[in-house]
């Protein structure tokens, strides 16, 4: 019997300390050795000429949850996590949604039952839609202590949005409990006002979503959540920064020493508002919130990444079917923009697109790529050191990636429940050839091999990254 169940041999391996050609030995689901000339494993893989990277960690995913629009989400845990494996992602964090008037504890328990179908490891964001005193003072601390270390709040969507007073209460409760607050930042009333004005003017096409949600909508809300979080010394993660102005708000908060971080998503780096102008109803395929932006914002996002202001790229996988009366066509093809459900799928496309557009085109280096898609999300969300790195003792979650493989993205390659991908036809250079979870081959470059139920719900312990700074605007500490 060999020392190793699996050896991935001779690949260019990105570890926590360096990038080198070496072997990775796996035993009992963990990375047991990294070095040259390891003895043969029970399974021995030649990775010469390939990249050996930590499995992707996608910390902004929606599976099997209701959408604000009332449309049906296209992925449950079985199909959504199949898609993840096909894109080299081995861990996800998705949203356990509390209903208004309902218990958060019961919502998480019900969601955990759905998640039993997951093929890969996963965690939950606690999506708080109704922050009652009982939820914040009794349920939240118990759920955080049980390992659900992140909270999600929305500043828009009628069924989700919290008022500023509720956001303050939630920030305070999360700080006390030790959870990271993630925010969907858009100014709800401004969107409503602009929407009514656009409809009255007869401007109802898909592209007018971007006119109802211009950057000022996002910039104002980003500024506001950062100010509230600063006043309460509560770390926050701004979700889906879509362009320069909201990124600049985050940069300013970081320069002040605030624990404020940001992600962008694949779609904001490669798609744009002009995609919503595609003929017929095609533009609906690109309707998301925040809306897609002009090319200048895409370039600004790459710069924010290079500057380290944005240090996570997630998918915001929000899959809807296109040709479906429960999907994008919920209100028919003549529906005005405000009646077309928002969301795009993107779990499987994230690593190939970011590698191709980022590393292959010289916008970022290989280490930055690994940090953006695996190491930083794992660290930020309390999944490290188990996830996000190739390191001895870490879970053997590994993606073997061929940097020379040219692929044209198609819907079939996504292995998801949606009937389209917004990236149809996009040519990428670099693609996963094998994905491993805890040493098991779960995607062989063409087929998803992981079975529903193989994934584990990862309990996340308290971690230093999200400890408050102890600094307040005045000498008064409201938490003492
Ligand atoms: O457009 C995005 N990002 N998601 C839509 C989610 C919803 O609840 O409508
Ligand atoms: Zn989302």
Image (cartoon, rainbow, N blue to C red):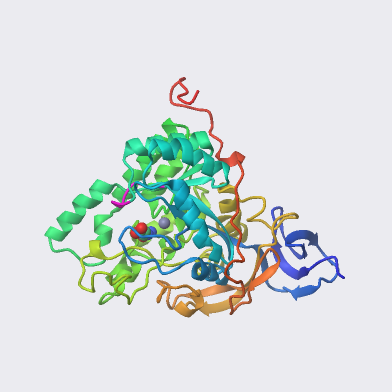
Using residue 31 as the reference point, say whether residue 314 is left or right of it.
left
Which quarter of the figure has residue 457? Answer: bottom right
Identity of the residue drawn at 61% across and 51% down: 383
- Image coordinates for residue 18, horizontal then vertical, percent: 71, 56
Using residue 237 as the reference point, say whether residue 274 is left or right of it.
left
Can the viewer see residue 388 in this picture? yes
Seen as rendered, the residue at the extreme top is 475
Identity of the residue drawn at 57% across and 41% down: 145
Identity of the residue drawn at 60% across and 50% down: 459
Q: Please check the rendered image and state whether residue 295 is part of the magenta-colored stretch, yes or no.
A: no
- Image coordinates for residue 350, horizontal then vertical, percent: 51, 65
- Most foreground residue, 233 or 116: 116
Using residue 427 as the reference point, say whether residue 454 is left or right of it.
right
Q: Please check the rendered image and state whether residue 155 is part of the magenta-colored stretch, yes or no.
A: yes
Can the viewer see residue 356 in this picture? no
Residue bounds of the magenta highlight: 153-159
- Most foreground residue, 98 or 10: 98
- Image coordinates for residue 470, horizontal then vertical, percent: 53, 28
């Amino acid at each position: 019997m060999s020392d190793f169940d699996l050896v991935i041999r001779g690949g260019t391996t990105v570890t926590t300390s360096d990038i080198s050609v070496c072997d990775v030995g796996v035993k009992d689901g963990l990375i047991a050795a990294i070095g040259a000339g390891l003895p043969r494993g029970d399974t021995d893989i030649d990775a010469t000429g390939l990249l050996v990277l930590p499995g992707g960690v996608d910390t902004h995913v929606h599976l099997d949850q209701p959408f604000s629009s009332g449309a049906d989400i296209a992925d449950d845990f079985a199909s959504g996590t199949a898609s993840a494996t096909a894109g080299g992602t081995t861990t996800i964090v998705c949203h356990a949604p509390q209903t208004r008037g309902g218990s958060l504890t019961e919502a998480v328990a019900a969601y955990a039952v759905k998640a039993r179908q997951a093929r890969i490891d996963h965690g939950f964001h606690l999506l708080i839609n109704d922050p009652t005193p009982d939820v914040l003072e009794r349920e939240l601390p118990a759920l955080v202590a049980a390992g659900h270390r992140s909270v999600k709040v929305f500043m828009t969507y009628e069924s989700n949005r919290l008022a500023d007073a509720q956001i303050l209460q939630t920030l305070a409760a999360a700080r006390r409990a030790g959870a990271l607050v993630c925010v969907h930042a858009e100014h709800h009333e401004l969107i409503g006002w602009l929407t009514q004005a656009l409809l009255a003017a007869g401007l109802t096409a898909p592209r007018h979503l971007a006119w109802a949600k211009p950057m000022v909508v996002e910039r104002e809300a980003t500024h506001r959540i950062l100010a509230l979080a600063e006043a309460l010394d509560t770390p926050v993660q701004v979700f889906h920064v879509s362009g320069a102005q909201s990124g600049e708000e985050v940069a300013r908060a970081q320069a002040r020493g605030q624990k404020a971080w940001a992600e962008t998503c694949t779609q904001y780096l490669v798609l744009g508002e002009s995609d919503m102008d595609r003929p017929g109803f095609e533009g609906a395929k690109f309707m998301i919130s925040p809306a897609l932006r002009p090319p200048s914002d895409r370039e600004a996002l790459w710069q924010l990444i290079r500057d380290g202001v944005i240090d996570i790229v997630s998918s915001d996988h929000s899959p809807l079917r296109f040709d479906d009366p429960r999907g994008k066509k919920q209100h028919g093809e003549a529906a005005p923009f405000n009646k077309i459900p928002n969301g795009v799928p993107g779990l499987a496309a994230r690593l190939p697109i970011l590698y191709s557009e980022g590393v292959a085109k010289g916008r970022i280096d290989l280490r930055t790529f690994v940090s953006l898609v695996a190491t930083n999300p794992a660290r930020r969300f309390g999944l490290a050191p188990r996830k996000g790195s190739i390191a001895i003792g870490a879970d053997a979650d590994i993606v073997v990636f061929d940097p020379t493989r040219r692929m044209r993205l198609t819907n079939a390659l996504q292995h998801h429940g949606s009937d389209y991908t917004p990236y149809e036809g996009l040519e990428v250079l670099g693609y996963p050839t094998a994905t491993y979870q805890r040493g098991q081959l779960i995607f062989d470059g063409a087929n998803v091999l992981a079975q529903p139920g193989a994934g584990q719900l990862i309990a996340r312990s308290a971690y230093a990254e999200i400890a408050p700074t102890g600094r307040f605007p005045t000498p008064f500490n409201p938490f003492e």
